[in-house]
Image (tube, helix red, strand yellow):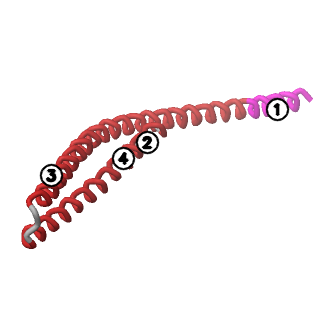
Amino acid sequence: MHAEENALAALFGQRTHLLSLVVRVQMQCDELSRRMYESEVGGAPAAQLQFVESQRIALRRAAAEIQSTIEDLNRAISLQQEKYMSARRESEKLERLRATELAAWHKQLERRDQAAVDELFLMRLGARSKR
């Protein structure tokens, strides 16, 4: 169960990292859009505008790839959650079985102890009656 839990935590960590990466890429894309607008207004050369636009396109493509990876991770997380829940149910089932067996063992031990006490009592009673 612990291995499944650790694997699930690792997947969540990867997803968190990728989500923060998407946010950074989108911020860079927004910054490039702002720079491009300022360049257009300022009369920047076409080559500079084309370079900024190609960077923006590359960033959007990178963001789309990261989103795709995040979707794959979400599917992996769902599968891992199912594995974890299954392992947890199995662990709880084993724990209940252990508790039941321990209670049965204690009950059996109490019966043996009581039988021993009863036998001693009967032996003493028999010894007194013979006197």
Quarter-of-image position of residue 84? top left
Q: Please name whichever residue, 54 or 76, is drawn nearer the observer in this view of the structure.
A: 54
According to the picture, the residue beneath numbered tag 4 turns out to be: 14
Closer to viewer: mark 4 or mark 1: 4
Q: Is residue 96 above or below residue 67?
A: above
Q: Amino acid at mark 1?
A: Leu
In-image side of 85 versus 102 (left or right): left
Residue name at image x 30 percent, y 54 percent: 21
Q: Which residues are magenta?
A: 116-131
According to the picture, the residue beneath numbered tag 3 turns out to be: 54
Asked whether disc 4 touches disc 3, contact meaning CB atoms under 8 Å apart, the reply is no
Q: Is residue 110 above or below residue 56?
A: above
According to the picture, the residue beneath numbered tag 1 turns out to be: 125
Q: Amino acid at mark 4?
A: Gln
- Pointer 4 or 2: first along the chain: 2
Could you give the CA–CA distance between mark 1 and mark 2, rounded to whole angstroms? 62 Å
Q: Amino acid at mark 2?
A: Glu
Q: Amino acid at mark 3?
A: Ser
- Pointer 1 or 2: first along the chain: 2
- Pointer 3 or 1: first along the chain: 3
Could you give the CA–CA distance between mark 3 and mark 1, rounded to whole angstroms? 104 Å
Task: Check disc 1 and report its element: helix, strand or loop.
Answer: helix
Label 3 crowd bin: few (<14), some (14–19), many (20+), radius 10 Å: few
Task: Check disc 4 and report its element: helix, strand or loop.
Answer: helix
Q: Please name whichever residue, 86 or 114, is drawn nearer the observer in this view of the structure.
A: 86
- Pointer 2 or 3: first along the chain: 2
